[in-house]
Image: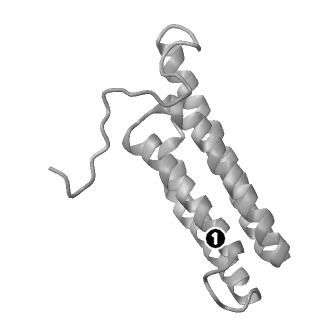
Amino acid sequence: CHPFHNKFGGRWVLVVGPLRALSSTLVWEATGMHLLNPVLLCIMLHLSVGDTWNTVNNVERRLGAAVPGVACVLASACFAATQFYSVSEKAGSLLGLTAVWITVAGLLIADTWRINAAEAGSKWEGEPLFPVKGEVATRFWFEK
């Protein structure tokens, strides 16, 4: 585990959540106040990619696969921010700030993988940077 992970998580909810909500509200208002909007669907794509990455990183604890996964989260955030910017410059700029936060998260994820791989002997040992079938099995709360 990386030493900064404990301090990073709580601030994520306090910073990124409000930025996403405010920027989405600005887009919603600028596009006629309806939710079935291609621009707003971009944030849904970003949230879906982020939730998938969250499961890989925090539930399944796949340190290797989490590295390219967080790059996908960053790419989806940048895509959503550019789409938001096309509708509202303010909304795009606010959502774009989350890309800075995700970049920092990505650096922490990559460094966590590097530190744990180094403990295995060298920086290229340990978990691979791609998903592999392993011992971890994802279970839902309703499964026994």
The extreme top residue here reads: 121
Where is residue 47? Give x, y as percent: 56, 61
Instruction: Say which element carries label 1.
Output: helix
Q: Residue furthest bottom?
A: 32
Identify the residue at image location x=52%, y=63%.
Answer: 13
Q: Residues within 10 Å of mark 1 (few under 14, many from 20)?
A: some
> Percent position (x, y) of residue 2?
51, 34
Q: How is the image coloured?
A: one colour
For residue 133, side relative to residue 111 (left or right)? left
38 w.r.t. 31: above or below: above
Q: Position of residue 52 (x, y in %)?
A: 49, 50
Residue extending furthest toward the left: 144
Q: Residue at x 67, y 91 (%)?
A: 33
Q: Which residue is mark 1?
A: 41
For residue 84, say whether it is visible: yes
Looking at the image, which residue is at 80% across and 63% down?
A: 82
Left or right: 127 as drawn, with respect to 23: left
Q: Is residue 15 visible?
A: no
Q: Quadrant of residue 130?
A: top right
Q: Is residue 36 above or below residue 3?
A: below
Q: Residue at x 52, y 12 (%)?
A: 125
Q: Amino acid at mark 1?
A: Leu
Q: Is residue 53 above or below residue 44?
A: above
